[in-house]
Image (spheres, grey):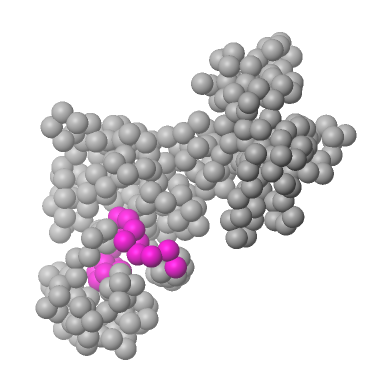
Amino acid sequence: MTLEINGLSHQYGSKQAIDDVSFTANDGELLALLGPSGCGKTTIVQAIAGHIRPTAGTISLRGEPVTTQPPEARGVGVVFQEPTLYPHMTVAENVAYGLKAKGIGPTERHERVESFLSLVDLSAVRDAMTTELSGGQRRRVELARALAPEPDILLLDEPLSALDRALRRRLQDEIRRIQAETGVTTLFVTHDQQEAMSLADRLVVIQDGRIEAIGEPRRLYHSPPNRFVGSFLGRSNTLTATVVDRERSVLSVAGTEIERPGLPESNHPVVQIRPDAVTVGSTDSSSSDEITFSGQVTAVSDRGTRYDVEIELAASERLIGTVQHSPPAVGQTVSVGVARRDLVVFDQ
């Protein structure tokens, strides 16, 4: 195990930034720290890097406690959200900077610089000034500089947030490739759900300074443990429900009674359904696994690769389903099918 966080808390004055945060990162794992802006992600990164002393809790790297150690005594590489390259240095000099500070000799320093510039595909611009590079190239230089000292863990704090969407996608692929080739344990911090789910082996989902869930991206997407995680990880329809028979585990959703074992305590729970789990049009009403609703199309939005179809069900409940081709017309009455397993029920 590379990283172990136990009971980490921190306050800025009277403001509680993080509260009792605990998680681990396994050797070679790419772990995403995911949550909305201001939820405490950067505070966790700064505590791991040694830039702040947490109010409570412990941090261990490779089994050694480092909570009170200064940044230079920890095997941590960091790429921050804001660029930190030295504009008066060349690309190669920037990558070598941390190696020189660690006392690594000229020969080994040169070998490492060449190796990591090759890894990020920047050997051809080794002698260029960083001000001459594109935004994507500068991010890759920062990656090479953080990796060159061969840290125990690489911390990436929203490194792609200032880039345009197309460049972000290309660099996501680059980060995944570089992480796989080096095998370095990586903590990737982001507020972008798609980014986290495409990159990470596991997610740590944060809200208001506390952990809401830890797990594999697809498992958390399909079986979220609470309403926040279900809403935050991708799009989700939210419908209100009423328990009509607790003994038989029956609830009513948009006028349709549904048997759903394991009802929550509330008599008016919330049901979440992913839009991509909604079948619009031809549904199999004879299937015991499929729940069928009927509703009227109120809006159709062309999203390029799909159409989003908004449908008003009974009791003024609305949901969005997706179709690939030939969407129904606004005002048309359609059947809507949802597999029973795709209904996730939470307390209010």
Looking at the image, residue 332 sits to the left or right of residue 271; the answer is right
Q: Where is residue 172 shown, x and y percent of the image? A: 43, 65
Q: Let me know if residue 262 appears in the view.
A: no
Residue appearing at x 31%, y 39% in the figure: 39
In the image, is residue 102 above or below residue 337? below
Q: Let me know if residue 314 appears in the view.
A: yes
Q: Where is residue 78 shown, x and y percent of the image? A: 26, 60
Looking at the image, residue 40 sits to the left or right of residue 338; the answer is left
**33 falls in the magenta region:** no
Image quadrant assignment for residue 112: bottom left
Q: Which residues are magenta?
A: 142-166
Q: Residue furthest front?
A: 331
In the image, is residue 12 above or below residue 242? below
Residue appearing at x 32%, y 86% in the figure: 123
Q: Residue furthest right?
A: 286
Image quadrant assignment for residue 237: top right
Residue appearing at x 65%, y 45% in the figure: 309
Q: Where is residue 208 shown, x and y percent of the image? A: 33, 34
Q: Nearer the viewer, residue 51 or 321?
A: 321
Residue appearing at x 20%, y 78% in the figure: 131
In the image, is residue 18 above or below residue 282? above
Q: Where is residue 35 shown, x and y percent of the image? A: 38, 43
Tally the marks. Answer: 0
**150 falls in the magenta region:** yes
Looking at the image, residue 39 sits to the left or right of residue 346; the answer is left
Q: Nearer the viewer, residue 66 or 280?
A: 280
